[in-house]
Image (cartoon, rainbow, N blue to C red):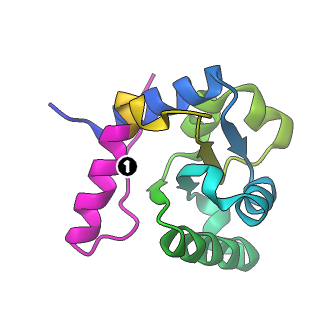
Amino acid sequence: MFSPGKCLEEALAAAQAEDRLTVGVYESAKIMTSDPDSVSFCVLAVDEEFECDVALQIHFTLIQSFCFDNDISIVRVSDTQRLSEIVGDKATQLEDAHCVLITNQDEGSWEDPALEKLHLFCEESRRLNDWVPEVNLPAR
């Protein structure tokens, strides 16, 4: 059975192993601005801080809009702590796992089966007018 959360975890682990992760709102914005074609997938993490931080909400709105305009698949997760655990050292260095980007490989980023499934999941969600689907990450 297809599990978007499990696929997301696998895609993040594969991207981390290949050094294709960008973690943090500002770091992600820099990559999107300088080289939008290099971005394959975007994960936005919502927590209690998001609810109280208007600046973070504005950043999320701008990142979502950018992703839509540049055909970048995007999902939302509600467990920032679990996402931080998955992306590991990068999140602890930056203390900001609210936005995580997976960038393309030089050749064949679509060869990652988990990432391919996530792209299809996002495409199907958009057909159902769910533009930023929420994905539940599996517990450890």
Task: Estimate how packed mark 1 is, as few (under 14), some (14 to 19) or many (20 or more) residues with alpha carbons within 10 Å.
Answer: some
Whole-percent x, y for residue 79 in the image: 51, 46
Task: Let me know if residue 132 is in the magenta part.
Answer: yes
Q: Can the viewer see residue 111 in this picture?
A: yes
Residue 87 higher or lower than 131, as above or below: above
Screen quadrant of the N terminus: top left
Kindly state the secondary structure of the residue where label 1 is placed. Answer: loop
Judged left or right of residue 89, residue 51 is: left
Q: Choose top left, top right, bottom left or bottom right for residue 65.
A: bottom right
Task: Let me know if residue 26 is in the magenta part.
Answer: no
Residue drawn at the location 29% of the way across and 68% of the way down: 126
| Residue highlighted by disc 1 | 135
Task: Identify the magenta region.
Answer: 116-140
Foreground residue among 6 and 126: 126
Q: Choose top left, top right, bottom left or bottom right for residue 5.
A: top left
User: Residue pushed farthest left?
Assistant: 1
Residue 17 higher or lower than 139, as above or below: above
Judged left or right of residue 12, residue 28 is: right
User: Residue pushed farthest front?
Assistant: 107
Whole-percent x, y for residue 133 in the image: 35, 61
